[in-house]
Image (spheres, rainbow, N blue to C red):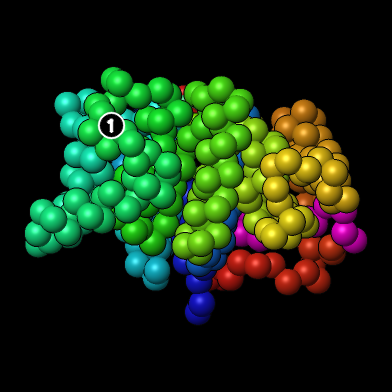
Amino acid sequence: MERAMISVEGLARRFGDHGQPAVFEDVWFGVEKGEFVCLIGHSGCGKTTILNVLAGLDRPSGGTVIVDNREIDGPSLDRAVIFQSHALLPWLSVLGNIAFAVSSRWPRWPRAKVREHALRFIELVGLKGAADKRPAELSGGMKQRVGIARALSIEPKMLLMDEPFSALDALTRGMLQDEVLRICAETQQTVFMITHDVDEAILLADRIVLMTNGPGACIAEFVVNTMPRAERQRNGLHRHPQYYAIRNHLVEFLVNRSRAFDREIAEHGYDSRRPRTVRPGLAAINPAAEVVPLRHAN
Ligand SMILES: Nc1ncnc2c1ncn2[C@@H]1O[C@H](COP(=O)(O)OP(=O)(O)O)[C@@H](O)[C@H]1O
Ligand SMILES: [Mg+2]
């Protein structure tokens, strides 16, 4: 039985008393090693809750998450999280914040080694001159960079990001997207990222997971980014021949299909363990015949 590196299997989450509807249920998907996956869905459908479960910060009401063939049972330095807000320690400098994470990861490292390692990641995100500044002295974009450097510095097996750029102005957001794209290409990082920005997903993701509206949200389908990684650049994205096919598909889902998915289920059927995979702009694939890039345990 072969599983994806991250395998989400029948996940459900309910809050409050019995009888409350589940925020989401029977959620199945996987993320392969080295893959960049984005999750898209409307506000309130349960995206952050899923990410919190993956991070080990929340427990599901049903189902499980298997990472590297082991069921997760709490937070781990193998899974670094970049939150919507930067979540830095305000009394520590940039270097201090990152060194703190590095020495949690490698407690036996001497100080000089921790420092050198931390500085390498500060440089990677372009903050070399700001190593001694405290978070309060930094702009929003710089703080988010520190969050990215901190997450990467512990060399996690996977990176979990919850709308990491949503609080930033467009210019800064674009620069950081480029940075993340470059770093992930260099390090072959496995990434699971939540976004509500369709263009961000097209730029960054190899595969996009579409989630329906809650309550009782589910995974509607997987959208393969038919634009190869090497051809994805922020400037000129919209000139790529695949761009509008992908974009229209995602927008159509968010505007119409995400809230009327029950109708699609009634018409075409639905297998929660194997939601269909579509490749916008390329020939539609028959879900029964397709080779799904996930390997579920069924
Ligand atoms: N700790 C909690 N207690 C009760 N309800 C919660 C809690 N966390 C999230 N929810 C509810 O779960 C739903 C999904 O929330 P969330 O995962 O934050 O959605 P998203 O990130 O997709 O916007 C929302 O209706 C929210 O009110
Ligand atoms: Mg959220």
Left or right: where 3 falls relative to 200 = left
All told, the count of numbered labels is 1
Q: Main secondary structure of the magenta part?
A: loop
Left or right: where 72 falls relative to 267 = left
The answer to whether any part of residue 220 appears in the image is no
Label 1 CB, ligand 2: below 8 Å? no
Residue at image point 26% right, 56% down: 117
Q: Residue placed farthest to the top in the image?
A: 136
Q: Magenta segment range? A: 271-283
Image coordinates for residue 57, horizontal then vertical, percent: 31, 42
Q: Residue placed farthest to the front in the image?
A: 129
Please determine whether, in this image, residue 4 is positioned above or below residue 249: below
Secondary structure beneath label 1: loop
The amino acid sitting under disc 1 is: Leu
Image coordinates for residue 290, horizontal then vertical, percent: 78, 69
The answer to whether any part of residue 179 appears in the image is yes
Residue at image point 23% right, 55% down: 116
Residue at image point 53% right, 38% down: 176
Q: Give the residue number, with chain letter if any, for mark 1.
A: 88
Image coordinates for residue 13, horizontal then vertical, percent: 44, 40
Residue at image point 47% right, 62% down: 187
Around disc 1, counting alpha carbons within 10 Å, would you say few (fewer than 14), some (14 to 19), or many (20 or more)?
some
Front-most of residues 256 and 16: 256
Image coordinates for residue 199, horizontal then vertical, percent: 70, 37
